[in-house]
Amino acid sequence: MSRANVTPMTSVRLFFALGSVLAGLAVAVGAFGAHGLRNALSAADLSTFEVGVRYQMYHALGLLAVAWAAARWESFLIGVAGWFFVAGIVLFSGSIYLLVLTGPRWLAAITPLGGVALLIGWVLLAWTAVQG
């Protein structure tokens, strides 16, 4: 089997697994926020925490779209898009979680970097579809 045949299927499985795990974690983190942090955080902090959960879920689903695309089109950019989604989730949602739970305001400087990574992931995914 050539490398060209192995790489796309590996990407499909990898990004499908990452998307599934990150979606499941979004459910768990969201439940923790809604039930475990309800009395520990202000309404504003809970709302901010929820934004992190929501964006994690959206982009976990985006990783499932990456897996779907990788199963249909051979493009190096599909994998790059997937890794931008992973990095974006970690930087965007992760910085929000840490900011709300631990308080260092410097973490707010990381959040936009995660947002940019998420945007790049969507642009690359769209570009791959157009080039299809």
Image: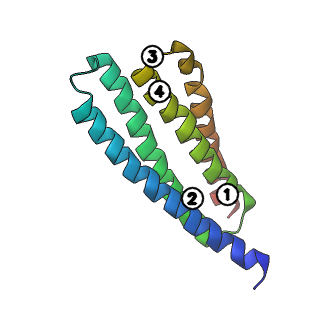
Vertically, is 89 above or below 102? below
Which SS class for mark 1? helix
Q: Does 101 sit left or right of 31 as displayed?
A: right
Mark 3 burial class by Cα count in 10 Å: few <14, some 14-19, many 20+: few
Depth check, mark 2 against mark 3: the one in front is 3
Of callouts 2 and 3, the N-terminal one: 2
Which SS class for mark 3? loop
Amino acid residing under circle 4: Leu
Of callouts 3 and 1, the N-terminal one: 1
Image colouring: rainbow
Give the x, y percent position of residue 20.
Answer: 44, 58
Give the x, y percent position of residue 83.
Answer: 64, 50
Look at the numbered discs 1 and 2 and tell me whether their residues touch, using CB distance below 8 Å: yes
Q: Which residue is mark 2?
A: 66
Mark 1 burial class by Cα count in 10 Å: few <14, some 14-19, many 20+: many
Q: Which residue is mark 4?
A: 98
Q: Which residue is mark 3?
A: 103
Which SS class for mark 4? helix
Q: Which residue is mark 1?
A: 79
Give the x, y percent position of residue 21.
Answer: 45, 55
